[in-house]
Amino acid sequence: MKFADCIDGGNVIVIAEIGINHEGSLSIAQDLIEAAIKSGVDAIKFQYRNLGNTYALKNEIGDEILSEEISRNYLSVNDILEMTKFAQKCNIMVGISFFDVGDVLDFEEKIEIFDFFKIPSAEITNLVLINKLVSFNKYVLISTGTADEATLKYSLSHIKGDNWLPLHCISNYPTASYNSKLGYIKHLRNTWNRPVGYSSHDSNWSINCAAILLGAQVIERHITLNKKSKGLDHSSSSTSDEFELIIDFIRNKDRILSGFGDRVPNQGELINLQNLGRSFYAAKDMPAGSAVLAKDFKYLSPKVGFGFELFANIDSPVLVKDIKAGQVLTPFYIKNRELLSDRAIDFCNSMSVGLPIRLHDYTTINNMFHLQNYEFHLSYGEINNLKEINDFNKNANYTIHLPDYCSANQLMDPFSASVSQKEKSIEVIKETLEFAEKISDVTGKQTGIVGSFSVVNSTIDQFYFQYSNLLAENTSQKVNLVMQWLPPIAWYFGGSVQLQVLNKFSDVTYLLDHEIDIVMDTSHLIMGKNYYDFDELGIVEKLKSQIKWFHISGASGIDGEGRGFATLTRGESKLMSDILKSDKIKIIEVWQGHLDNYYGFQNAIETLDQEFNYG
């Protein structure tokens, strides 16, 4: 990665300046570099001053303080070169600030190791230094702090080269929000007709997000391990956590600013609409032909049928089927529909396509669809009821989906530091394993269990190590415990959570190295492709020996989960066609397919037949 390539490509570069926050310690400097890398920044930057060529006088109070700080926080040329090599081995760019040409000469020919250079605000008039650094044909960043407009114009107009860009900067440490004057970023860009950046000393890290929106292509900010540490720069620095927030903003900037056009609710809103909204539930038994009047229904949660929008769209709705007290009013009761075709059912059975079922609707779905493959989707509240279920077809294939939650406010996490969360998660897995073994005893086949394991408690390496052991310990001739490929964003507890594992191309290596079996969810895969821009066909190909079965549906954008099969693009249709031809089980997971008398499932099956049945 080259600095110039990033700038020319229009990317935003985030630089974590080590500055003098290393306190003169190589160990702390390395810790700062590792923290910067972890946060996702693109580059780090050092400062260098030759101590024998810095202060002539120390009579002023401020000079005395600064001189002491510079001496206390000194790193030698060799120290900086050592840290630079360490950072570059970690695939991160390294720059350096100089205050005098003599400082540059201390590095001799090794000056070429740096990826970019920086002119601090106080040296804006030092054209000897500026032009010396420009001569190395690498980008030179020039801070504009402390300069008035006339001084700035004179210096910048006398630079002998084009490989430089100005950084808006307010040289207060820290800078109060009301002093940031970010409008100057646009002025710089318009005046000099080149990329510009922002050198931030703001007490409020989020000011940098506004700078990015105004066109800053470089964000430079000091990094610290502790804002309360002794020293001048720590209070105007950011921790790695704050850098992560800046990086997150950059990565999602276009998405944050999207939305111009017709409003489309995201997946989390749809979930909350269902959970918090209300529908009309019949207050009494009503025969077909009855007028649908609000007074004959109770308006209750959840919203899994018609609300008041029904009366806005239909003048005089009439029941076409009997409805019983307590049943929710859906299109099933006011619209005549064709029955599911035998051809579509036969096609699904021939392709090992099945449906998700709940404990309470298994018999109903089986009688309606007559499929050979089913997946029990469990909630944490149903775990204690598993022993009551015994009605299994020995000729069918069953898989099981673990609950995403182990309680009303805790995700499934058998490795949690919370004792209650860990114990509940382990108990859910234990009870589900016993349920799977009971199914296996009837069918004579291995029963698969899939879990959406998504909580990373320490490192990614540790996550995969722990789960590879958990899966191995709980897999036998009767049961196969596997992990599910996850979406980039999960809608947990009514809000969005960006997941760190099982959704990127880099996760393929972990899965292969640890020989972890998975369930591939095509909706999650498509959303991941839209978020991370990877090759979804390539991922399936690389993992084909470890994919035990599939969850299939379409998707839109980065969070439109469970869309129907008619929404697939050409590439996604190729993916779906290849998956359908495999001999592995495919469970349809279209959004709300079980509602409205399972019309979503019926429509999905018919669409699969129409789009992919070439017989």
Image (cartoon, helix red, strand yellow):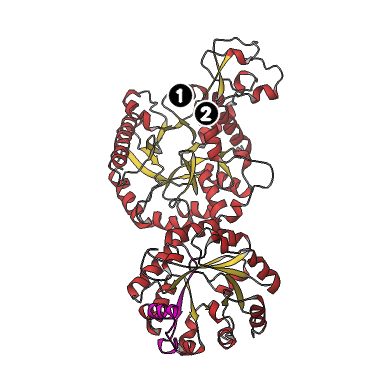
Residue 593 seen by the camera = no
All told, the count of numbered labels is: 2
Mark 1 or mark 2, earlier in chain: 1
Q: Return the residue nearer the eye: 304 or 477.
A: 304
Q: Return the residue nearer the eye: 78 or 239.
A: 239
Q: Which residue is mark 1?
A: 361
Q: Secondary structure at mark 1?
A: loop
Is 362 in the magenta?
A: no
Question: Which span of residues is magenta-colored?
Answer: 41-70
Numbered circle sitting on residue 594: 2
Q: Return the residue nearer the eye: 394 or 59.
A: 59
Q: Residues within 10 Å of mark 1 (few under 14, many from 20)?
A: few
Q: CA distance from mark 1 to mark 2?
A: 9 Å
Q: Give the quarter of the figure containing the C terminus.
A: top right
Is 55 in the magenta?
A: yes
Residue 155 drawn at (x, y percent): 63, 82
Residue 190 seen by the camera = yes
